[in-house]
């Protein structure tokens, strides 16, 4: 047993180490990127703010139905006249160019992402942006090799892809959508989330720098209504959405009766399962990475810790000790581990569910956060853990999408599987054990699209990602991620 | 004096047994000349729910079988069907009014289709699974797994069409509830007899007869059904409403075909991959 340290004071004091903001040049206002140019929208505009300071960063155009129609028309023209006629080897070179430009402007993109989203620079610089470049590199190479994708001798693109992405990994989600779509020969109309439009607009500039033919990529900013206009536009052939299960269901209803192809990457409530033979320190790192990475704004976050009963006390003590060392604060500080919550609205949701959780576990467990000073401006929520949680609790069933961990216990592998699968979601799961055969048995029985064994929250362009059940359908990444943008043999 | 023949009562096929509809309802099934063939069971909402329960119960065991074993069982269905080919030829001729040669072609093709899919059971994973060369010290592999319980509205072809939609679903480890062709339900129940004697565990295939327009909405909105195959839905308005209902728990939907399917043509792999999920497993590499 380890002794619980005094967690009221941090182990180390750090001097501030802020990344310079001077590398980014945020314009006061942004239009829509349609047919290769920035144009004014017909609709209103909205403000995007920095969630860590609530500073207004820019005014952004809100695309209405007419704007979306223009974007879809541009995409259709580009598809018919240019992109579908271009040899795959030429499409590939455009994508390689984009990948290189992303690498060249990587620091700028990382700083901008951290300012607009609130995520730590450590993460945007070392995870998000490098993975974005890697995605474009990976799919670039597919563009002239589609006949080797296992879909027949001459697989065809769908045409115009309408894509709607969330705010948690703004540019990375763009890359997951745009790279395979373009490689397969589609053109795209993409809507970034209303709270994080800036890196998508910088990406539009990168498309210009790459001399990408006008209309191949169109970026329309806006909120739910703009997304709806894209999804229901009759000339969109393929819809790709990442976001909430609720909106995913609405999209599935909206496309009923059409011939539109759809992929949905939705919510999750992943179990992170720790057995008594797991190396505890590694498992604790995995638990922390699983739920506090990106402020818990991760659809595959390991938000339910299932720990074997006989090691529960030890794991909890070490987890608390580790949580006490997490540095919450300025996203641009290179030492920051946990940044700002993305919006006031999301913060309110996290607070509400956490307050409900506190009532639910009263008497059986506790709500615990390490002592940490939160900035007075901006949207902040401390890393939080709930013990004494049962499967019936809302805190164990609903996606919080914040730095909030629920802890449950189990005795046998069968019980762990039963509890892990007892959710309408099925996006991801984690398993921590030193026994190889048990890892494979667990991996076979967990109904989830990604199983991380003795690791968590790893992503790679070659590795398919996506859910079972109400976590959506279709895969992004790897060969299945390419196939999602090509007509199958049944076409 | 001519012998009085023994007529068969056609019931439903649920959980490996042949129950009547709990509703007690039947409907008249005539042959191609309009003469009475039999009273078929007219399945109800409760029958559909019972069938889903049976399919869910069978899913763990069936999906847990080795691919080799599932292939053997599907091949066994072909063997038993071959042994009863004369009966099926006669049923097809009577119910559809087709020539002996057409009926023979359909039965042959149905048997061959089962053999074709049986061979796929232990190959589809190798064709659609991937080993992923991630940029780091990790073992990373993606394999297909069955989606779960699939509800099917079967096409008109009473034997070949039915076999062509059911075989890919069960070969890949899914279980299903099938609404048989409304005008030609009897062959589907006779096929149930073949499956019941082919080492196919009860509940892997469940056959309902009756009205698709009445029963399919209950399956489309059922929260314990994971997939919906609309191949046999000919009314576009019904197809749309079923697809909408399926969104409630994000069922995987295979839409009705735009053009009539040539069931004699060799199929692609899409009827299998429609009911497969990709599972990706990561593990660090180290010493």
Image (tube, rainbow, N blue to C red):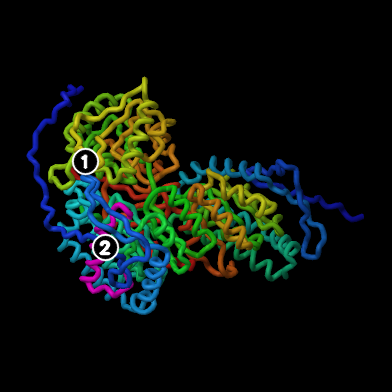
A178 displayed left or right of B99: left
Name the quadrant of the N terminus of chain A: top left
Most extreme residue toward the left is A15
> How far is the residue under mark 1 from the one under mark 2?
25 Å
**Measured along the vertical axis of the image, is residue A254 above or below residue A10?**
below
**Measured along the vertical axis of the image, is residue B218 above or below residue A480?**
above
A435 displayed left or right of A10: right
Q: Quadrant of residue A364?
A: top left
User: How many residues crowd mark 2 within 10 Å: few (<14), some (14–19), many (20+)?
Assistant: many
Tag on residue B218?
none
Counting from the top left corner in percent of width and height, residue A393 is at 41, 31
Mark 1 or mark 2: which comes first in sequence?
Answer: 2
Q: Judge if badges 1 and 2 mark residues of a common chain.
A: yes
A232 displayed left or right of A463: right
- Asked whether disc 1 touches disc 2, contact meaning CB atoms under 8 Å apart, the reply is no
Residue positioned 27% across, 28% down in the render: A368
Q: Tag 2, which secondary structure?
A: strand
Is residue B106 or residue B68 the one in the foreground? Answer: B106
Q: Tag 1, which secondary structure?
A: loop
Is residue B23 or residue A266 the one in the foreground? Answer: A266
Most extreme residue toward the top is A363
Magenta residues?
Answer: A193-217
Q: What residue sits right under mark 2 in the picture?
A: A30
Is residue A76 or residue A355 the one in the foreground? Answer: A355
- Residue B280 falls inside the magenta stretch: no
Tag on residue A377?
1
Q: Chain of mark 2?
A: A
Counting from the top left corner in percent of width and height, residue B56 is at 54, 42
Counting from the top left corner in percent of width and height, residue B109 is at 60, 65
Counting from the top left corner in percent of width and height, residue B110 is at 60, 62
Residue positioned 33% across, 45% down in the render: A300
Q: Chain of mark 1?
A: A
């Amino acid at each position: 047993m380890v002794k619980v340290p005094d967690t009221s004071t941090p182990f180390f004091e750090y001097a501030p180490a802020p990344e310079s903001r001077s590398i980014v040049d945020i314009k006061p206002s942004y239009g829509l990127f349609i047919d290769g140019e920035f144009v004014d929208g017909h609709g209103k505009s909205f403000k995007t703010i920095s969630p860590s300071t609530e500073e207004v960063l820019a005014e952004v155009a809100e695309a209405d139905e007419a704007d979306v129609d223009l974007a879809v028309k541009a995409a259709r023209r580009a598809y018919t006249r240019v992109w579908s006629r271009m040899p795959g080897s030429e499409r590939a070179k455009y994508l390689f160019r984009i990948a290189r430009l992303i690498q060249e402007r990587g620091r700028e993109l990382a700083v901008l992402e951290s300012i607009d989203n609130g995520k730590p620079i450590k993460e945007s610089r070392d995870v998000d942006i490098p993975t974005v470049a890697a995605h474009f590199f990976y799919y670039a190479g597919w563009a002239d090799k589609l006949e080797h994708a296992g879909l027949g001798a001459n697989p065809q693109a769908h045409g115009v892809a309408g894509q709607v992405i969330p705010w948690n990994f703004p540019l990375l989600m763009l890359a997951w959508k745009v790279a395979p779509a373009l490689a397969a020969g589609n053109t795209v109309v993409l809507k970034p989330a209303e709270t994080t439009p800036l890196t998508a607009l910088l990406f539009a500039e990168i498309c210009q720098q790459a001399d990408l033919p006008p209309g191949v990529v169109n970026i329309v900013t806006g909120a739910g209504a703009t997304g709806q206009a894209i999804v229901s536009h009759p000339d969109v052939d393929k819809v790709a959405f990442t976001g909430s299960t609720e909106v995913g269901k609405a999209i599935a209803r909206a496309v009923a009766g059409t011939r539109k192809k759809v992929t949905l990457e939705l919510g999750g409530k992943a179990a992170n399962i720790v057995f008594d033979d797991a190396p505890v320190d590694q498992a604790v790192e995995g638990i922390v990475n699983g739920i506090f990475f990106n402020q818990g704004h991760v659809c595959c976050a390991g938000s339910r810790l299932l720990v074997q009963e006989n090691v529960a006390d030890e794991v909890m003590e070490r987890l608390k000790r580790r949580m006490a060392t997490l540095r919450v604060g300025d996203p641009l500080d290179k030492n920051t581990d946990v940044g700002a919550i993305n919006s006031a609205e999301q913060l309110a949701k996290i607070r509400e569910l956490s307050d409900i959780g506190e009532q639910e576990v009263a008497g059986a467990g506790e709500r615990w956060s390490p002592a940490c000073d939160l900035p007075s401006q901006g949207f902040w929520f401390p890393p939080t853990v709930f013990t004494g949680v049962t499967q019936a609790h809302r805190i164990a069933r609903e996606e919080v999408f914040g730095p909030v961990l629920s802890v449950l216990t189990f005795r046998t592998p069968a019980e762990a599987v039963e509890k892990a699968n007892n959710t309408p979601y099925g996006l991801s799961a984690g398993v921590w054990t030193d026994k190889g055969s048990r890892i494979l048995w667990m991996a076979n029985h967990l109904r989830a699209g990604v199983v991380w064994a003795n690791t968590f929250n790893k992503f790679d362009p070659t590795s398919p990602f996506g859910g079972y059940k109400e976590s959506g359908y279709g895969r992004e990444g790897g060969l299945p991620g390419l196939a999602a943008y090509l007509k199958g043999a049944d076409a | 004096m001519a012998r009085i023949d023994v007529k068969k009562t056609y019931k439903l096929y649920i959980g490996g047994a042949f129950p009547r509809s709990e509703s007690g309802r039947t409907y008249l099934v005539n042959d191609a000349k309009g003469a009475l063939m039999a009273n078929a069971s007219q399945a109800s909402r409760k029958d559909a729910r019972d069938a889903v329960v049976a399919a869910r119960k069978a899913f763990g065991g069936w999906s847990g079988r080795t691919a080799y074993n599932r292939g053997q069982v599907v091949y066994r269905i072909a063997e038993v069907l071959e042994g009863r080919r004369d009966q099926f030829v006669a049923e097809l001729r009577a119910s559809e009014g087709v020539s002996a040669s057409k009926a023979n072609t359909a039965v042959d093709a149905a048997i061959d289709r089962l053999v074709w899919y049986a061979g796929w059971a232990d190959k589809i994973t190798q064709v659609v699974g991937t080993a992923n060369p991630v940029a780091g010290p990790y073992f990373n592999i993606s394999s297909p797994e069955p989606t779960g319980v699939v509800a099917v509205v079967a096409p008109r072809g009473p034997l070949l069409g039915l076999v062509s939609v059911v075989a890919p679903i069960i070969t890949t480890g899914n279980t299903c509830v099938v609404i048989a062709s409304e005008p030609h339900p009897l062959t589907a129940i006779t096929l149930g007899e073949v499956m019941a004697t082919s080492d196919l565990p009860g509940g892997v295939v469940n056959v309902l007869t009756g009205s698709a327009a009445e029963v399919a909405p209950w399956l489309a909105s059922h929260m314990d059904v994971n997939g919906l195959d609309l191949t046999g839905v000919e009314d576009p308005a019904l197809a749309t409403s079923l697809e909408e209902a399926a969104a409630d728990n994000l069922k995987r939907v295979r839409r009705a075909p735009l053009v009539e399917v040539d069931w004699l043509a060799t199929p692609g792999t899409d009827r299998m991959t429609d009911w497969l999920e990709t599972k990706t497993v990561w593990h660090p590499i180290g010493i």
